[in-house]
Image: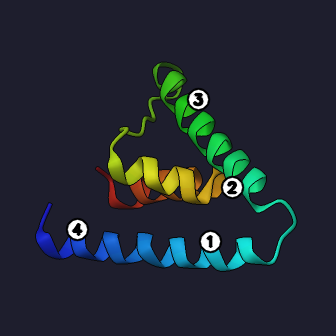
Amino acid sequence: MSAGLKVGIGLVLAACGVVLLFSLAFIHRPVRRLLSGALQGLCALAAVNILAGVTGVSLGLNVYSGTVCCLLGLPGVVSLLLAEWLLGR
């Protein structure tokens, strides 16, 4: 992975974090919602990897995919699946 791609991914993740912090400032029980979204994302990532033998689709667990799944939850997992499909790993 090139340095430019790593910087781009880092900037996107930082922007997602800033948006997440702003949105958490305006909702009731922000910590509970943050933790439940992160847990849902990690469970969805685990489910995708558990069902990889049946579906043939898997996502590697690394710093980037874990961060996306924790910050964005289920939409993050879907985004990773779409990115893998479009980029054709």
Q: Are marks 2 and 1 in contact (CB under 8 Å)?
A: yes
- Which label's residue is closer to the chain start, 4 or 1? 4
SS type, badge 1? helix
In the image, 87 versus 42, the foreground residue is 42
Say whether residue 40 is left or right of residue 4. Answer: right
Q: Which residue is mark 3?
A: 47
Q: Which residue is mark 4?
A: 6
Camera-side mark, 2 or 4: 2
- Which label's residue is closer to the chain start, 2 or 4? 4
In the image, 26 versus 72, the foreground residue is 26
Real-space Cα separation, disc 3 to disc 1, in angstroms = 24 Å
In the image, 20 versus 69, the foreground residue is 20
Q: Which residue is mark 1?
A: 20
SS type, badge 3? helix
Real-space Cα separation, disc 3 to disc 2, in angstroms = 20 Å
Q: Is residue 54 above or below residue 65?
A: above
Give me the residue at 72% from left, 56% from top: 31
Real-space Cα separation, disc 2 to disc 4, in angstroms = 25 Å
- Number of residues whose C-alpha sits closer than 10 Å to that of mark 2, classed few (under 14), some (14–19) or many (20 or more): some
Give me the residue at 35% from left, 78% from top: 11
Q: Which residue is mark 2?
A: 34
Real-space Cα separation, disc 4 to disc 3, in angstroms = 27 Å
Q: Are marks 4 and 1 in contact (CB under 8 Å)?
A: no
Percent from the top left, x then y, of residue 65? Answer: 41, 50
- Number of residues whose C-alpha sits closer than 10 Å to that of mark 4, classed few (under 14), some (14–19) or many (20 or more): few
Camera-side mark, 3 or 2: 2
- Which label's residue is closer to the chain start, 2 or 1? 1
- Number of residues whose C-alpha sits closer than 10 Å to that of mark 3, classed few (under 14), some (14–19) or many (20 or more): few
Amino acid carrying label 1: it is Leu
Amino acid carrying label 4: it is Lys
Camera-side mark, 4 or 1: 1
